[in-house]
Image (tube, rainbow, N blue to C red):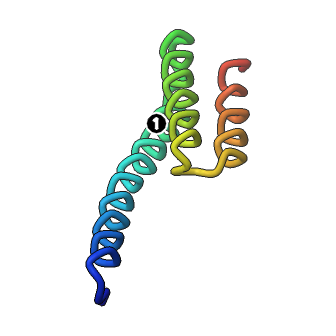
Amino acid sequence: MANKKAAKKAELQSQKRALENCGVRNRLKTLAKKLRASTGDTQGVKRVAMEYISALDKAAKRKVVHRNFANKRKCSAARFLCV
């Protein structure tokens, strides 16, 4: 346990950020599942893919996920658009 006030504050901030980042990662997983499940109309697939790519960009910008991870996933999402 932290002894100093600044260390206690840093611990609380870290816990808060971890909780927020967990929500962002869960959203990315949900969007990835939606993209894999969407097969029917091309407009629906395109909309879900663009939403997923946008969420990946935002997560990488805020350093929730690594930028290379985001680029790999964006590449695979773009393959769904080509098929």
Q: Is residue 2 above or below residue 44?
A: below
Q: How far from the left and from the top, in percent, is residue 83?
A: 71, 20
Residue nearest the viewer, comparing 34 with 2 = 2
* Camera-side residue of 22 and 47: 22
Above/below status of 16 relative to 46: below
Q: Residue at x 28, y 68 (%)?
A: 12
Q: What type is the residue that disc 1 sits on?
A: Leu
What residue do we see at 52% from left, 31% from top? 52
Left or right placement of residue 15 versus residue 21 in this view = left
For residue 22, what is the image quadrant?
A: bottom left
Is residue 48 shown left or right of residue 82?
left
Give residue 27's quadrant in the image.
top left
Residue drawn 66% across and 19% down?
81
Spot occupied by residue 60 in the image (x, y as percentages of width and height): 58, 42
Residue position marked by numbered label 1 in the rendering? 31
Element under label 1? helix
Depth check, front residue: 17 or 57: 17
> In the figure, is residue 57 to the left or right of 48?
right
Q: Quadrant of the N terminus?
A: bottom left
* Position of 3 relative to 49 (above/below): below
Residue at the image position 50 percent from the left and 33 percent from the top: 55
Other-residue count near label 1 (Cα within 10 Å), few / some / many at <14 / 14–19 / ≥20: some
- Count how many numbered circles sit on residues in the image: 1
* Rendered location of residue 37, percent (x, y): 49, 33
How far across and down, in percent of the image, does residue 31 sit? 46, 36
